Image (spheres, rainbow, N blue to C red):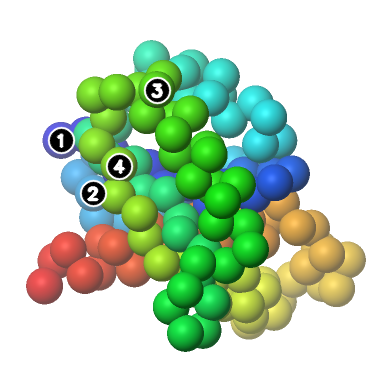
Amino acid sequence: MARILCIDYGQKRTGIAVTDEMQIIASGLTTIPSATAIDFLKDYFSKEKVELVLIGEPKQMNGTPSQSASIIKGFVTHFTNHFPDMKVVRVDERFTSKMAFQTMIDSGLKKKQRQNKGLIDEISATIMLQDYLSRKMF
């Protein structure tokens, strides 16, 4: 089987998570500067087989697109231009940053470590991916 990759795209940073080849476990891969996302993905796809990419879709509480939705929509267009054969699924990313921060607290990270916004982005991508895997299994 091939991996599933999840992207939590942001204006400055992009968190990336990936499954194992059996698509059972979601793990944080890295956080990169958003400007380097396409180059990073070209390199990653050349080394690893990925069958599906999840990209976070920011929404407000009432389900309407958030302010950052247009930035991410631009990235999705850019992504599909570079990787036209890659299947893309948009996933709701509401609450993932808060859940990621709580995960950092629950795992005992010190206050200084919890200020690492890149780690929050990576954990957010992992949460989105694990949620997708959980829904896929049922």
Q: Position of residue 45 (x, y in %)?
A: 38, 22
Q: Which residue is mark 1?
A: 1
Q: Which amino acid lies under the numbered mark 4 shown in the image of this protein?
A: Val
**Camera-side mark, 3 or 2:** 3
Which residue is disc 3 drawn over?
Answer: 81
Label at residue 60: none
Identity of the residue drawn at 83% across and 64% down: 115
Determine whether the residue tagged by mark 3 lies in a helix, strand or loop: helix
| Front disc: 3 or 1 | 3
Q: Are marks 2 and 1 in contact (CB under 8 Å)?
A: yes
Mark toward the start of the polypeptide (2 vs 4): 2
Numbered tag placed on residue 23 in the rendering: 2
- Spatial separation of the CA atoms under disc 3 and disc 2: 26 Å
Amino acid type of disc 2?
Answer: Gln
Whole-number angstrom distance, CA of label 2 to CA of label 1 = 8 Å
User: What residue sits right under mark 4 in the picture?
Assistant: 88
Judge the density around disc 2: few (<14), some (14-19), many (≥20) Cα neighbours within 10 Å: some
**Relative depth, front residue between 56 and 26:** 56
Residue 76, horizontal then vertical, whole percent: 45, 39
